[in-house]
Amino acid sequence: MRKLFFYSVLTGLVILNSFLLANPNILGKIGLIIYNYHYLRNFPRTLITVSLVVGTSVALAELINFLVKNQFVNRRTGVIVLSVLTLVAFVALVNTAIAFSKWTYSHTGLRFQIGAFILPTLLICVFVYTLLKLPTIPEAFPESPVANEQIHPQNPTE
């Protein structure tokens, strides 16, 4: 139920992010044409682009969750991979902040800027959510040597 709620909120945020990225101000529209960002020129293209990015990250996170749950990889490896992916998304967020502090992108409008910051934040949320919900596999208790001695006594003459 929690996973369904999380992914429904994520879907709503993807649609909101696509709307924000598809509606820059006039300088932002000129910049999209000059820099040939054809995948952000209108809402349907932006929705497809953002959905593919977030969908790929969700699929990757769920694959790691599946592999850990079915013990194809251990939990530590899953934690490391998800942590690296979270770090990469955080680096993308920092890169976005640096890019939008320069003159070229700073005049694209507040909606476009907020949309640009939301996308890496969504990726961070996906990876951290999966990291927190990563299953733990309980380890079996080792067999007790005392139980073996009671079943098969070593010195039966006593």
Image (cartoon, grey):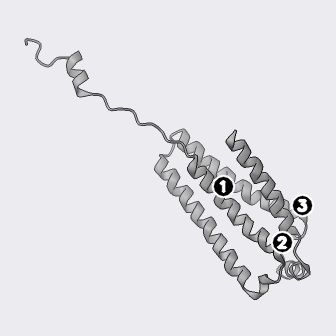
Mark 3 or 2: in front is 2
**Which numbered tag is attached to residue 126?**
1
Q: Position of residue 47 (x, y in %)?
A: 84, 60
Query: Which element carries disc 2, helix, strand or loop?
Result: helix
Q: Please report the residue visible at 70 percent of the width from the left and 60 percent of the height from the top.
A: 122
- Quadrant placement of the C terminus: top left
Callout 1 amino acid: Val
Q: Amino acid at mark 2?
A: Arg
Foreground mark, 1 or 2, reads 2
Direction from residue 157 to residue 44 in the image, left or right: right
> At numbered mark 1, what does the secondary structure look like: helix, strand or loop?
helix
Gap in Å between the C-alphas at discs 1 and 2?
22 Å
Q: Which numbered tag is attached to residue 44?
A: 3
Residue 46 in view (yes/no) = no
Identity of the residue drawn at 68% across and 50% down: 59
Camera-side mark, 1 or 3:
1
Residue type, label 3 = Pro
* Residue lying at 32% horizontally and 32% vertically, measured from the top left: 142
**Element at label 3:** helix
Residue 128 vs residue 61, the one in the foreground:
128
| As drawn, 42 above or below 35 | above
Q: Is residue 11 visible?
A: yes
For disc 2, the marked residue is 111
Residue 60 on image: x %, y %: 64, 52
